[in-house]
Image: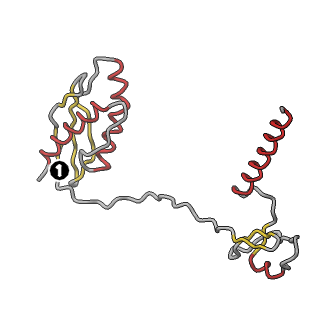
């Protein structure tokens, strides 16, 4: 009985492996171009492949009494960075200090510098600094928040993971500074 079980496992494994190779194109069947299929006899089981394909040829797999067209590869779209159009913000030039906002372990207060109607700098005047964890979190999150605000040209920035309270307090303080800067 053991022999039959082991034999069955081996056979099933071989069939699964063969199927896997066929499905994922790992078969060693020669590939020929479509303009060469006319030279093939329908009853001929062998094919002499050419070493290279022209870029315009559609690759095919030769099989006895049957020709299948393989799908042509498609390119994967890639994102290319582009600069966003500059939109007039309506901010008056100057330096504006936002109201302090509660970040659970302390207050966050920012100062926004507007030049040419755009946010050019955001500085932290206050940040939680009585605990080592607060200092570590804010030392990493604050520069990210300030940079995002400058890029976005508003207070609508993404919350920094692990610094949710600080991020929300930053948004509140910056928004109060930008409210003062609106013309």
Residue 132 appears left or right of 119: right
The image shows a total of numbered marks equal to 1
Q: Position of residue 167 (x, y in %)?
A: 28, 35
Relative depth, front residue between 153 and 93? 153
Residue at point 58% right, 64% down? 75
Question: At 30% across and 32% down in the image, what residue appears?
Answer: 164
Which quarter of the figure has residue 99? Answer: top left
Looking at the rendered structure, the secondary structure element under dot 1 is loop
Q: Looking at the picture, does residue 122 appear above or below residue 75?
A: above
**Would you say 64 lies left or right of 59 here?**
right
Q: Residue at x 32, y 34 (%)?
A: 142
Q: Which residue is mark 1?
A: 93
Q: Position of residue 148 (x, y in %)?
A: 33, 44
Question: For this rendering, which residue is in front, 16 or 150?
Answer: 16
- In the figure, 63 relative to 89: above or below? below
Which one is in front, 28 or 13? Answer: 13
17 is higher (above) or lower (below) than 7: below
Between residues 35 and 7, which one lies in front from this camera angle? Answer: 7
């Amino acid at each position: 009985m053991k022999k039959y079980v082991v034999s069955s496992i081996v056979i099933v494994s071989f069939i699964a492996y063969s199927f896997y190779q066929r499905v994922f194109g790992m078969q060693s069947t020669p590939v020929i171009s479509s303009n060469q299929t006319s030279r093939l006899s329908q009853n001929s089981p062998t094919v002499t492949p050419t070493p290279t394909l022209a870029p315009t040829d559609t690759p095919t797999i030769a099989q006895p009494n049957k020709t299948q067209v393989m799908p042509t590869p498609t390119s994967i779209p890639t994102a290319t960075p582009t600069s966003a159009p500059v939109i007039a913000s309506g901010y008056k030039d100057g330096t504006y200090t936002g109201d302090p906002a509660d970040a659970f372990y302390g207050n966050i207060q920012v100062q926004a510098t507007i030049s040419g109607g755009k946010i050019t700098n955001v500085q932290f005047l206050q940040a939680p600094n009585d605990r080592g964890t607060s200092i570590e979190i804010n030392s990493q999150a604050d520069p990210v928040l300030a940079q995002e605000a400058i890029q976005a040209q508003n207070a609508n920035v993404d919350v920094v993971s692990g610094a949710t309270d600080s991020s929300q307090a930053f948004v509140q303080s910056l928004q109060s500074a930008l409210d003062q800067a609106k013309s």
